Image (tube, rainbow, N blue to C red):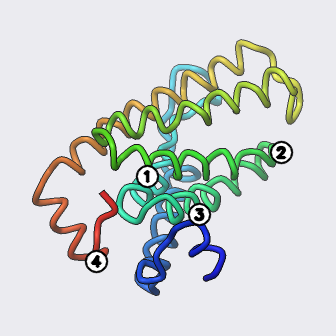
Amino acid sequence: MFLLSSFGVSLKKITPKNIAFTAIFAAIGILFGTILLIPTPVPNVYLDLSHIGTVLSAMLLGPVFGGITGFIVGIWPGITFGNFFVPPFKALTGILVAILSKKTRPGVAVFVGYLPEAFLTYLTLAVLKIPYGLPLPVIYTILLKAFAEFIILAILMEIIMRNNGIKRFLESKVGFLYL
């Protein structure tokens, strides 16, 4: 609790309900990142919307819960691809999306909030060659796929967060909206 309050999270917001919603959003992200994969024309490349849980958590619960959700969602791909940087990069996206969502439209917050993760992903894969020195065309395909996912997520969040009926429903379930 002290750690979260030292990052500016009100102890009033650290409730069993918000912790449960963080777990639910993480589970949604893991589900969309492991099971509900959308095939692309490129062999062995699938669109996954794993960040949907991170983005929802960030926009509804704030930067700390968005960061925690992103970190949890990033554990499986980090293990699968042997890149231990994935969880903190996804956490960074959750934090930035939450901060930006207070200042701009939901779609813009989602897309711009992902840019540092994209840059850091490129840096680790192309420059540092972590985990196993992928060829540049593969790295570009991964990043292009990720940008497509974030465009889809930006559109979804724009629809969800700008709809007053959906917003009121979510607020009644979560208890408050970070937005």
Q: Amino acid at mark 3?
A: Ile
The residues bearing labels 3 and 2 have C-alpha atoms spaced at a distance of 20 Å
Q: Which residue is label 1 attached to?
A: 98
Frontmost of labels 1 and 3 is: 1
Which residue is located at x 53 percent, y 63 percent? Answer: 64
Q: Which residue is label 4 attached to?
A: 175
The residues bearing labels 4 and 1 have C-alpha atoms spaced at a distance of 17 Å
Q: Position of residue 104 (x, y in %)?
A: 31, 39
Q: Position of residue 35 (x, y in %)?
A: 54, 53
Which element type, helix, strand or loop, lies under badge 2? Answer: loop
Q: Which residue is label 3 attached to?
A: 68
Residue pushed farthest left?
165
Q: Nearer the viewer, residue 122 or 45?
A: 122
Q: Position of residue 65 (x, y in %)?
A: 51, 65
Picture layout, residue 152 above or below residue 170: above
Residue pushed farthest bottom?
16
Which element type, helix, strand or loop, lies under badge 3? Answer: helix
Q: Is residue 171 left or right of residue 148?
A: left
Query: Mark 2: few, some, or many residues within 10 Å (few <14, many ≥20)?
Result: few
